[in-house]
Amino acid sequence: MGVRKIKNSWWVDFHIHRTRYRKRSPDNSRSGALAYETLLKQRLARCEPIDEKPKEPQPTFEQFAWKWFDHYVRPNNKYSEQLSKKYALASSLIPFFGHMPIRQIKSYDIERYKAEQIERGFKNKTIANRLTILNKCLVTAYEWLELEGAPPKIKWIKWAPPEIDYLSPDECEWLLSQADGVIFEMVLMALRTGMRQGELRALQWPSIDWLTRSVAVRHSRDDHQRLLVPPKNGRTRHIPLDTDVYALLYARKRTSGYVFLAEDGQPFTKRRLWGAMRRLCGREKFRPIGWHTLRHTFASHLAMRGVPLPAIKELLGHATITTTMRYAHIAPSTLRAAIDILNPKTAVDGELRQPGVNRWQEMQGSEAVERAQASKFA
């Protein structure tokens, strides 16, 4: 029988295996009914039910956000990251988006949120961090709930990256001269390897390869769980040890356990290590710095000495080169060479392949000789 129109409505009406199927077409047109008939027959051929399931009510952003936090954030993020995301959800994102069903959140709503955050005086960096959390939550919602379409696009807010604080060579010497004991060892290790403070606290003796003179960074220490966790990007990296660090560690070589322990024989906590650095900087009123400043110092000194950025990336364990590019401006050699090309005193001569200053001096000398000869015969 196919399709037919009954009282201004198009219906699908056909028989398969002596069973009659008669249903109203969701698209009230002849072409829509024909397409619906084809769809139903395909479902029957695949032994699928043709009656559509009633749509489940869509969760609001608040309902899904806490589900996402429990089932995604907790298993995949460090405790400190869990705290920051929980605070962002509770204090900012849920108060604004919480009552809205997931699929009803549009790009316009996100723009309104950005405007509200700016009006309330939040910095662009803070707003960008919160938008990152919102985006990940929405992307996960569309995946888990199998929603049609795509999550709303976010126009990312721009923000200036913070300036990098690093120590000069003289400041490094002063800091090392003021430290002693295990704190001296940890400061030296941080300055010569660029390891994060959590990685220093988690360092185990088996991670040091005495044959290759390198350290394998496999863990970071989680104070909340009091156990070892993977480093920030989840990948093990290997860092060569310089002579000073190697000799210092080899002098008290062990086969197991933590490399750095506090006076009571327990692993350092983040709070305890921060206090040690604060007391160290308090001597002679040295400017306050954190342990991450030592990591910046390691990378900055490498860049200033012409080490390629990809090599610095691998030593620091960055996931992408974009993060390492923050040190690009500290390496002036390439930029200086580019500027010197414009100066005839420093540019490279194209024909003789020698510094242009030599050709310039020769030219100046020749001109001086010509002037002297001209004045002699004048």
Image: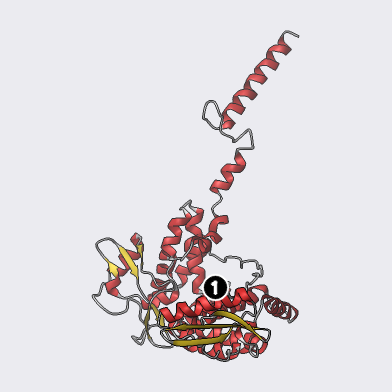
Q: Amino acid at mark 1?
A: Ile
Q: Residue at x 55, y 32 (%)?
A: 355
Query: What is the quadrant of residue 107 in the picture?
Result: bottom right
Badge 1 marks a residue whose secondary structure is: loop
Judge the density around disc 1: few (<14), some (14-19), many (≥20) Cα neighbours within 10 Å: some
Q: How is the image coloured?
A: secondary structure
* Residue 333 location (% of width, % of height): 54, 47
Whether 16 is drawn above or below 63: the answer is above
Front one among 91 and 98: 98
Residue sitting at 31 percent across and 76 percent down?
204
Q: Quadrant of the C terminus?
A: top right
Q: In this rendering, is residue 286 above or below 102?
A: above
Residue 15 higher or lower than 364, as above or below: below
**Horizontal placement of 272 versus 206: left or right?**
right
**Residue 34: image location, x then y, percent:** 56, 75
Residue 7, by quadrant, is bottom right
Q: Choose between 132 and 239: the one closer to the eye.
A: 132
- Number of dots carrying numbers: 1
The residue beneath circle 1 is 289
Where is residue 150 drawn, in percent x and y? 58, 74
* Left or right placement of residue 341 versus residue 111 in this view: left
